[in-house]
Image: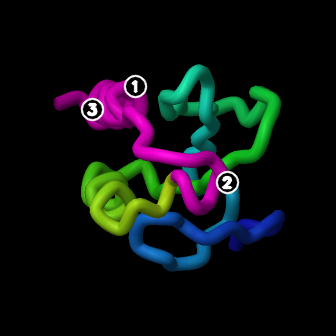
Amino acid sequence: MHTGPVRTCVGCRLRAVAAELLRVVVEDGSLVPDPRRGRPGRGAWLHPDPECLRLAERRRAFPRALRVPGPLDAAAVREHLEQRLGT
């Protein structure tokens, strides 16, 4: 069993160990994946699953979780997930 910090996915709202989730931050009005968890700023956590990304976008969860105004461009996160899944 994994131990460590537990975070909540902004897409499906399920709790998971942080090692199983992808951290996402905002840079210049766009969402940026932070797989090494080293970028500065507030982070939102997401399962590395395109369905969780879709749910988070539909619920407008990223601006709320990251405490920034307006819609955010998730293209970089979507591309990261596609590369990771090999699609």
> Dot 3 corresponds to which residue?
82
> Dot 1 corresponds to which residue?
76
Amino acid type indicated by mark 1: Ala
Q: Secondary structure at mark 1?
A: helix
Q: Is residue 70 left or right of residue 24?
A: left
What residue appears at the point 51 percent right and 54 percent down from the top-left corner? Answer: 62
Residues at marks 2 and 1, CA–CA distance in whole angstroms: 19 Å
Q: How is the image coloured?
A: rainbow
Which of marks 1 and 2 precedes in the sequence?
2
Amino acid type indicated by mark 2: Arg
Write the start and end of the magenta stretch as one range: 63-87
x%, y% of residue 59?
36, 68
Task: Tell which residue pokes out farthest to the bottom in this image.
Answer: 14
> Dot 2 corresponds to which residue?
67
56 lies above or below 50: below
Which of marks 3 and 1 precedes in the sequence?
1
| Residue 69 included in the magenta stretch of the image | yes
24 lies above or below 49: above
Residues at marks 1 and 3, CA–CA distance in whole angstroms: 10 Å
63 lies above or below 4: above
| Residue 71 included in the magenta stretch of the image | yes
Amino acid type indicated by mark 3: Glu
x%, y% of residue 52?
35, 60
Which of the two marks, 3 or 2, is nearer to us in this view? 2
Q: Is residue 24 left or right of residue 82?
A: right
> The N terminus appears in which quarter of the rendering?
bottom right
x%, y% of residue 55?
31, 64
What residue appears at the point 27 percent right and 56 percent down from the top-left corner? Answer: 54
What residue appears at the point 81 percent right and 30 percent down from the top-left corner? Answer: 40
**Badge 3: residue crowd in 10 Å (few <14, some 14–19, many ≥20):** some
What residue appears at the point 79 percent right and 37 percent down from the top-left corner? Answer: 41
